[in-house]
Image (spheres, rainbow, N blue to C red):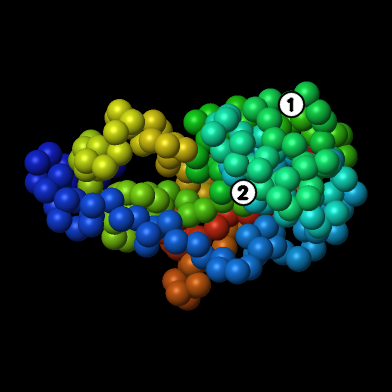
Amino acid sequence: MGFIGGALGYRLLRWVGNGGDSQRAEASAYGSRSKVEALLGRGIWDELAGKVVIDFGCGVGREAVEVAEHGARFVIGLDIRDSVLEAARRTARERGVDDRCVFVTRSEARADAILTIDCFEHFNDPGGVLDVMATMLQRDGRVYIAFGPPWYHPLGGHLFSVFPWAHLVFTERALIRWRSDFKRDGARRFTEVEAGLNLMTVGRFERLVQRSAFRVEHFEAVPIRRLRVLWNGLTREFCTSVVRCRLALR
């Protein structure tokens, strides 16, 4: 992974990295649009209406609150970070859905649907997460997954993508050293940075699902719009913007 490292790699990153300004990599691609709807289509609201929904990896709760506003019977936002859950609870109160939208670090509930957006490239143990989801889903339930960008996307390194595919050009050690100039959390690997990066590719995700308790009802690797003409079976790892799918128990 990466071929420019050492002092040279670090100096180059300091030169091009603009002090850790990752706005290019992290800027919203959705503008004022609903992220849930943009990723999963308008029909998602009908599919979730009247159901108990778990938002797995809910973060600050925007999507969970939106699902509740669109008619879900009850929404459970799950995240391991207490810091984001408090922000999620506040949002639910402000939007008037806190009576049917809760945010917790664990739950014994069994859901009709599980939603997870922009999480599978961050989970430390994504295969284990699929196993947990299988225990939390009603027999006739569905899991809706959307994540991106995958690892080989031009900005698949997220913060580390200081220019397209920079995370594939520089070594992990050089990138982490550069990050330590403005992030003081002591992370030494991609997996240890805030939210984590597990180097998830399209192919790896497919293999994880194949080994899981789920079967695929729908799977789509969405091409990067500007690279659509180049997208094919050989280039999809480098030209896929978002992976989205719907899973059911076998």
Query: Residue 55 location, x and y as percent?
Result: 70, 42
* Closer to the camera in the image, 155 or 71: 71
> Is 205 left or right of 190, judged from the image as shown?
right
Q: Which mark is residue 107?
A: 1
Disc 2 residue type? Ile
Cα–Cα gap, marks 1 and 2: 19 Å
Is residue 115 visible in the rendered structure shown here? no
Q: Height in image: 123 above or below 47?
A: above
State the residue at coordinates (68%, 25%): 106
**Residue 34, x across and y down, in percent:** 66, 63
Give the residue furthest to the front: 94
Sequence order check, earlier mark of 1 and 2: 1
For the N terminus, give its image quadrant: top left
Q: Residue at x 85, y 34 (%)?
A: 138
User: For this rendering, which residue is in front, 19 or 225?
Assistant: 19
Badge 1 density bin: few <14, some 14–19, many ≥20, Cα 10 Å: few
Residue at image position (50%, 43%) is 121
Residue 75 bears which disc, if any? Answer: none
Task: Return the residue at label 2.
Answer: 117
The x, y position of residue 250, in whole percent, is 79, 36
Left or right? Give the position of 246 relative to 27. Answer: right
